[in-house]
Amino acid sequence: MAERAPQAEVGMSSELLDEAPGADRASEVMTVNIGPHHPATHGVLRLVVDLEGELVREVRPVIGYVHTGIEKSCEDKSYWKVIPFVERMDYVSYFFQMEAFCGAVERLVELEIPERAKHLRVIFLELNRIHSHLVWLGTTALDLGAISMLWYCFRERDRILDLFEMATGQRMHTRYFQVGGVIEDIPRGFEAKLRSFIADMPVRVGQYEALLDRNEVFLQRTKNTGIVSRERLLELGVTGPLLRAAGEPWDLRKAFDYLAYPKFDFKVPVGTVGDNYDRYRVRVAEMVESVRIIEQALDGLPEGPYIADDRKYVLPPRSELSTSMESLIHHFKLVTEGYRVPPSEIYYAIESPRGELGCFVLADGSAKPARVHFRDPSFVNLQAFRDMSVDSYVADMICSLGMLDPILGGVDR
Amino acid sequence: MPDAPGLELIRGEIEAAHPGAVLDTGFAQDRAVLSIDPAHVLAVLTWLREAPGQEYTFLSSLHAADYLPAAPRFAVHYELLNRDRVERLRVKALLDDPASPAGGTVGGPAPEDASATAGGGGSPAVTGPAGQALPSIDSCVGLFPTANFQEREVFDFFGIVFEGHPELTRILLPEDYAGWPQRRDFPVGGEPVTFTYNERNYG
Amino acid sequence: MEVERQPLAVERTTMRERQLRARDMLRGDLEGEELERYVEEKVVMTNFEKMLGWARSNSIFPLTFGLACCAIEAPISIVTARYDLARFGAEALRASPRQADMIILSGRVSIKMAPVVRRLYDQMLEPKWAISMGACSSSGGMFSNYAVVQGADKFMPIDLHIPGCPPRPEAVLYGFTKLQRKIQGNPDQGWRARYQAEGTEEWARGGPRSEPSAEAAEAYLAARELLGA
């Protein structure tokens, strides 16, 4: 799909110019297996590649190497126990899975969450978005050879994880969101630490850009590689930064107003060409926008409860357990059996760092969901990989794989 | 989302074009649901994608659910999205399990003639690797290329065969895996944990 | 195999005496009781073996192998600047198993991946070690279902298990130092040594009331002796 025109720009010798794709030389097509264990750090993805010299003729992704049966396990657990399970699907953006599931269940039981909880959820979601993009940037730059980016990005990532640990006790997989709000309020000192982080972050992003934006090697590798047209991406169901890099300003945060996003003023970065360089620029710009959202959410953080008051679905505060019999009974029912959700089904989608993350919950009236399915963005985006890499070099395929940002936990579930 | 009267209008228009396609409409949590007969799934999806007022050109998600013990047992869900009007519409194609004793009234590939009759009639002639009868439905990969991996996943987990899919093989489980894990009658699996001290001392 | 430990003929053998005895043994000159005693006594760590153990433990080449969530903590997070694995000597992460010493199973091992992991482990050269990081590879973790192997030691030998979901990078580094001690021939018996609980190990095979089979018990005692327990 991608025409390799810029061979002349690269300054290759004239003999190699004869080997343009489509030339009638009877070349041998060799099938090479890449993965599931490979130096690229994106997870256990196996690619069966048909190579003609260095040109990729066909690529077939084989997935399922980290399939964990999460959706099946969820059918066996009460609703609040499902939350740690679904967190571990896309293991870099864990807050988003929690939000998709909790949001879906909240809509099923028609539970309104308080404003403070909405702001807190937005803060953690955007912190997780920055975290996901930092991991992406570090590992992708590592794959492309810019090894020092890994250390710089993970330095910031460790600061975000410190914030998570301060608020929730865990660095990853925090089970912080619960149906009705968040499980705990943010501690004292969190706001100050977060403010110092968001004050530093734009400076750091500037440093990353200074390293990569005009780096000759990086530009040669990412400019005009892996181009897929906008229409083709829409046909393939691709969403998220990949679609936005191709010029389509589709962002679920702006399209469907969920949580407190309508209150905040933020831009959605959109690319023009849809090549790997645009994908990189879109994600880096998204990091800056996320910082702006966090700042606005923190400034406008209202006082109030951090979780809904409905005792049928939310645990009562522990102080009440010793005085109120009713609270004790609620607590007992919720912990042993869990809450029952009336028979219904819903599909609720949010914008995760990789695209549209949708959660389908089918409730059958009991305390356990009858079906939990996640429409994972990496799973659907992987279908675009073939279009990105066919008829280009292997090196471009590796670059496209990095810019595709697949997280195999989400792909395989 | 199309509101309730809008949904009824859609139903009316589809019924006019393809009688017997729509079995039911539902409206819950601000979401419109069309339950259709699987024999007409391609017709309905094409109509929804191309009709001038509808234009649901984006398939967000294709997944299935097992409603055991209710009948029809399976439903393939198509989450359609219109990005310009920002509207979602869910299309449910209800499939019976031909392997069950009572199954076989709903479900099957599209009949030859264009004027579709309601219901497929009898179990489809699709058998799985172990010889059991599998429900089948037309594949919409031609309409929505995004359905490629997602239909394979539904096949992998439920055993629902998509007629016309270019490469319907297992995608997440090993190629030679036997069984359809996401069905409700498939056990979760795993092993019991042996706590030897307690069992030895306290029976 | 019941073993009688005899005290040595002299209270303290010097290095020189042991070397002479070793030389005699190699030449085939030791026989009878002397040979038996030599074999039966605690494994003597010669200085050379100690040095070998020290060198091996401080220059481990880990394999860059990440499966799932634990992979973000290790191998990615522990090689970064805050939790630096390089200060323990394990800086050179190799992508090819044929050049690597140690495999850290970071993440859940699904049934599709298990043969791949076994093959990777087999491709590594001796001496090699395996760390099972996190709950999922140690025991299946929270995923007790059809798709996850309930513990990687069902199909490959594991030297060290690190609990956690995911374990903090500090926990992984602590486990790493324990592995280093094991490589040096001084394995940390952990709580069993501290609470004098050697001999309280339980056997899970064959059901809760079974005794270990004779071969299993023999092999276990021999292994403990070899490690110097």
Image (cartoon, coloured by chain):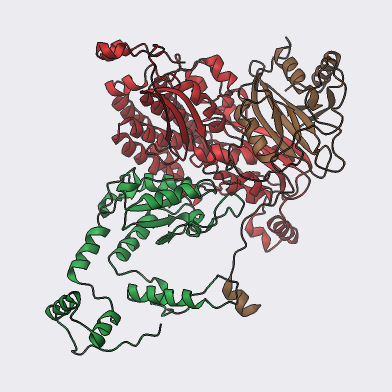
Chain colours: A red, B brown, C green
In this picture, is C12 found above or below C163? below
Displayed quadrant of residue A239: top right
At 32% across and 44% down in the image, what residue appears?
C80
- Vertically, is C176 above or below A381? below
> Quarter holding the N terminus of chain C?
bottom left
Q: Position of residue A406 (x, y in %)?
A: 48, 33
Residue A266 % position (x, y):
50, 24
Left or right position of A332 against A221: right
Quarter of the C terminus of chain C within the rendering:
bottom left
Q: Is the residue B3 above or below the residue A354 in the image?
A: above
Residue drawn 62% across the image and 45% down it: B177
The answer to which image quadrant residue B124 occupies is: top right
Which residue is drawn at the image coordinates 77% and 37% (left, top)?
B74
**Of the pair C20 and C144, the residue shown nearer to us:** C20
> At which x and y percent is residue C159?
39, 62
Residue A315, can we see it?
Answer: yes
Q: Nearer the viewer, residue A61 or A361?
A: A61
Task: Please count the marks in the image.
Answer: 0
Along the line of sight, the residue nearer the viewer: B7 or C108: C108
Q: Percent from the top left, x then y, of residue B67?
A: 78, 41
The residue under the point 80% across, 41% down is B99
Q: Is residue A187 visible?
A: no
